[in-house]
Image (cartoon, rainbow, N blue to C red):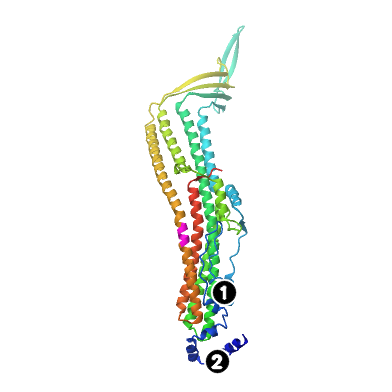
Amino acid sequence: MKRSNETVGKAVAAVTKMNGAQARKFASVRWMAVLLCVFCPDVTRAQAPAAVVPSPTMPQGSPPNIASPATNPQAMPSEPAVDDPMLAPPPRPQRELADWNEAAVELRARSISLATAYAEVSKAEAQSRIALAALLPSINASATATHQFITNKVTTIQNITNGTQNIRTLTTPSSDYINGNITLVQSLVDAKAWHDLGTARAAEVVQRLGIENVKRTMILSLATSMVTVVTAERIAEINRIGLRSALELLNLTNKKRSLGAATGLDTVRAEQIVASSRASIVSGDESLRQAREALGLALGEPRQVAVTSALKLDGVLQSIGQTCHPLNNSFERPELAAARQQLAVTERGIRSVELSFLPTLKAQSTVSSSTLDPGASPRTTWNIQAVLSVPIWDGGARYGSLRSARANRDEAAYSIESTQRSITIEVEQARRAVQVAEQSVAVARNSAALAARNDELTRIAYRLGQGTTSFELVAAAVALQQAQVQLAVQEFGVVGARLTALLAMARCSD
């Protein structure tokens, strides 16, 4: 070993005495590899790299480490460590989700969509109560206080007693008096009111089915947002690995240039890949921030929300499977059931307009009292009446309402057909998307392995000066980073496809 070190030292001294042309000529000789070993002592081992082992099947919940040994800084001790501010990981937000149950509880408590759906149910219940009120007794009371500004005084003889006239002066009209009455009205025969009550209760069912659909869609949205955050975090990590690799390549190129084995063009190309890696980090970090903000909005928080490394995506799938129950067929989807119920409501609307042509019968009782002396009549009266209302002509308003109700029925029928077609395609695409995603992962994993192998061999050849240009080196590095990002996206795309397929045939009623 001592003799080898002395030999290398002599070689270095000899090269330092050469001029530029002699050094470049010497660099083309195979012995240049001996000189390069001074800076990368493990290059001899790198000449026979081990075969790149494809990444194992993605474990549920966490993606495999797709960084190849050629791009992992810890696996390349031959290159000196680099330091750059952009290599630091992006800052973590204050709020982080630890498990799915925590996210589900907060989702139910803060979801605006779910609160709106419950408000729609409350409105439907209120309409039912309004419809019931038309069938129950109504009691109304009124009072009137009257003061007359213009009056006349009239003297009248009330009677004659023992030859004496009893004279009384009256004010006409009476100046101050109060009238009061209480009226009770009870519907006896009103077919339309009874029918409208049933229609309102059927509309309640439509809104409750809407709640189930909202729960399904918001769970899918939350789970997809969580997967998107995990994917963005993985891509941000890959971008930093790419920057570290680019900086190491730039250092190597600068050293070769100082020895005359590289040109200024090689340095510029190395600097280009560093700049490209920095741009990827900037855009990737912004995508990560947007993904975290989208997750925060899904949870009802106007801020960034991250996902801890302890959260496993397979656990998310299992939790959703326990909350949402699978359906036997697509016709049981809540939105399709709601569309069918809406059709029944519109058909009842037609019948309601038809019943408005029938007469109605009501019973009415009124108690009235006044401070005004009516003379021979009592001051307090009480009566009961039967009121029969027969609709004869209203200018054609009921005929217009009938046409509108029939048009609503036709639209509801068309909506059922459209919803059924959409659900059929959605379910089929969701099932097929899982297979496509799994196939895409296999292809992306193979491409990443080949790109890692190509980048590793290109780096080795570039270090040894075996005719590899800096352009090929840059192209290999860019292809590797793109393959790694694509693999990460496809791996997490499998999780998203499984979530979509699971919720495409499920009912989330809890």
Query: Taken as a whole, is the magenta stretch helix, strand or loop?
Result: helix
The quadrant of the rendering that contains the C terminus is: top right
Q: Nearer the viewer, residue 35 or 502?
A: 35
- Return the residue at label 1: 76
Residue at image position (41%, 34%) is 347
For label 1, count other residues whose C-alpha is less than 10 Å away and answer few (under 14), some (14-19) or many (20+): some
Q: Amino acid at mark 1?
A: Met
Q: Is residue 321 visible?
A: yes
Horizontal and vertical percent position of residue 244: 55, 72
- Which region is colored magenta? 437-442
The quadrant of the rendering that contains the N terminus is: bottom right
Q: Amino acid at mark 2?
A: Ala
Q: Is residue 508 left or right of residue 357?
A: right
Residue at image position (41%, 31%) is 351
Q: Is residue 290 visible?
A: no
Horizontal and vertical percent position of residue 18: 52, 92
Horizontal and vertical percent position of residue 19: 51, 92
Q: Is residue 469 left or right of residue 162?
A: left
Mark 2 secondary-structure assignment = helix
Horizontal and vertical percent position of residue 270: 50, 77
Q: Nearer the viewer, residue 197 or 187?
A: 197
Placement of 273 over or under 11, stated as above or below: above
Q: Earlier in the sequence, mark 1 or mark 2?
A: 2
Residue 332 part of the magenta segment: no
Placement of 244 over or under 504, stated as above or below: below
Q: Which mark is residue 298?
A: none
Placement of 18 over or under 86, stated as above or below: below
Placement of 240 over or under 433, stated as above or below: below
